[in-house]
Image (tube, rainbow, N blue to C red):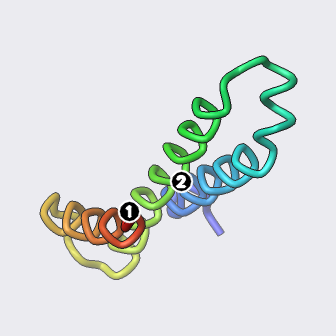
Amino acid sequence: MDIRQNILLVDGLAASYAGVVVISSTNWLQGLYQLPEALLVSMALVNLSYAVYSLTLSTIKREGKSCGKNRVLRVMAAEFKSTNRL
């Protein structure tokens, strides 16, 4: 497997791993770095959002479809709507 061909997949998986690690160790990181919990949670959410974006691009690339901005934005908007229901 040539990592250059799957860079978006590797990038998305790394971002999701980082987001999960930060969200699961928020209390420990808060005590270690004296950062507000809200900042750590928002950093984790940014990582997870980026992971969704990168993995979406990776999926589109694998399917052989064009990487048009409209398609990516529609997929991201659908993900955002489904995760932000109150």
**Quadrant the N terminus occupies:** bottom right
- Which residue sits at x=54%, y=63%? 9
**Residue 34 vs residue 19: left or right?**
right
> Which numbered disc, 1 or 2, marks the residue that appears first in the sequence?
2
When the figure is inspected, residue 81 is found, relative to residue 17, above or below; the finding is below
Kindly report the distance in space between the C-alpha atoms of the residues bearing marks 1 and 2. Answer: 13 Å
**Residue 69 vs residue 49: left or right?**
left
* Mark 1 Cα shell of 10 Å, populated few (<14), some (14-19), many (≥20): few
* Residue under label 1: 84
Q: Amino acid at mark 2?
A: Leu
Q: Amino acid at mark 1?
A: Asn
**Residue 72 vs residue 36: left or right?**
left
Q: Secondary structure at mark 1?
A: loop
- Residue most toward the left? 70
- Which residue sits at x=54%, y=38%? 42
- Which residue sits at x=41%, y=74%? 59
Q: Position of residue 78 (x, y in %)?
A: 28, 71
* Residue under label 2: 48
Residue toward you, 71 or 84: 84
When the figure is inspected, residue 77 is found, relative to residue 35, above or below; the finding is below
Q: Position of residue 21 (x, y in %)?
A: 75, 49
- Residue most toward the top? 34
